[in-house]
Image (cartoon, grey):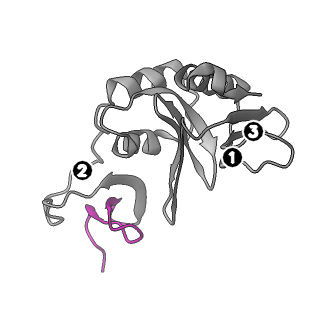
Amino acid sequence: MTRPAAWLPDPLDDALVRYWDGHRWTFHTAVRQIAQTVAAAPPPQPSPPPALRPDVASAVERTRGALMGSMKEINLLPGYLYPEERVLALTSAQGEGFGVLACTDRRLLFLFVGVLRKQFIQVDWNQTKGITYDRTSKAFAVYTTKPTRRAIPAFSVRVARVEDAQAVAQAAQMASSAPRLDVY
């Protein structure tokens, strides 16, 4: 017995609905609406994502297409932002999975939402002491103490392109009361 194509509750995350194409689960997800009824007639194709906030759209435009595998997280990003927080720069990054590294006017954050787990890490500017980027390992690390060989970062993700890491680091330096943040 087969089930017709429909948006159904995600079997791994109660906060999402996932599109069942009639044969298998797809990668298309949406935030579950409380008042939404699941039995409603499904669209023949998954609907296009909602329009991005202007600050997020501007940051996406500045990346010039370097956001491979991160659009799901970019569409979910506004739900993780404070009401008047602005996104200054973002890029694709890898933590527990491929997600988005964002620099805002209040903090640095990494967001990954996978089928089995999600990862959300943030460090506010009043806690951030330094940022490093290692070109060899491609590790972008954020520290709440002075970055030294023995210091452990608050979080570390991999950023494939050095240009993207530099863009996020420059935005971070401008946003964080510049003289206090060390960028290496």
- The residue that mark 2 highlights is 44
Q: What is the span of residues highlighted in magenta in the rendered image?
A: 1-23
- Indicate the quadrant where residue 31 lies: bottom left
Give the structural element (helix, strand or loop) at label 1: strand
Residue 81 image position (x, y, % from top left): 38, 40
Out of 117 and 156, give the one closest to the viewer: 156
How packed is label 3: few (under 14 Cα within 10 Å), some, or many (20 or more)? some
Query: Mainly helix, strand or loop, the magenta region?
Result: loop
Name the quadrant of the N terminus.
bottom left
Q: Residue at x 71, y 47 (%)?
A: 153
Q: Which of pointers 3 and 2 lies earlier in the amino acid sequence? A: 2
Residue 26 on the magenta segment: no
Q: Is residue 120 above or below residue 174?
A: below
Q: Residue at x 28, y 72 (%)?
A: 3
- The residue that mark 3 highlights is 146
Disc 3 to disc 2, C-alpha distance: 54 Å
Out of 38 and 41, give the one closest to the viewer: 38
Asked if residue 100 lies left or right of residue 24, the reply is right
- The residue that mark 1 highlights is 156
Q: Is residue 67 above or below residue 45?
A: above
Out of 6 and 183, give the one closest to the viewer: 183
Q: Amino acid at mark 3?
A: Lys
Disc 2 to disc 1, C-alpha distance: 41 Å
Give the structural element (helix, strand or loop) at label 3: loop
Residue 121 image position (x, y, % from top left): 54, 50
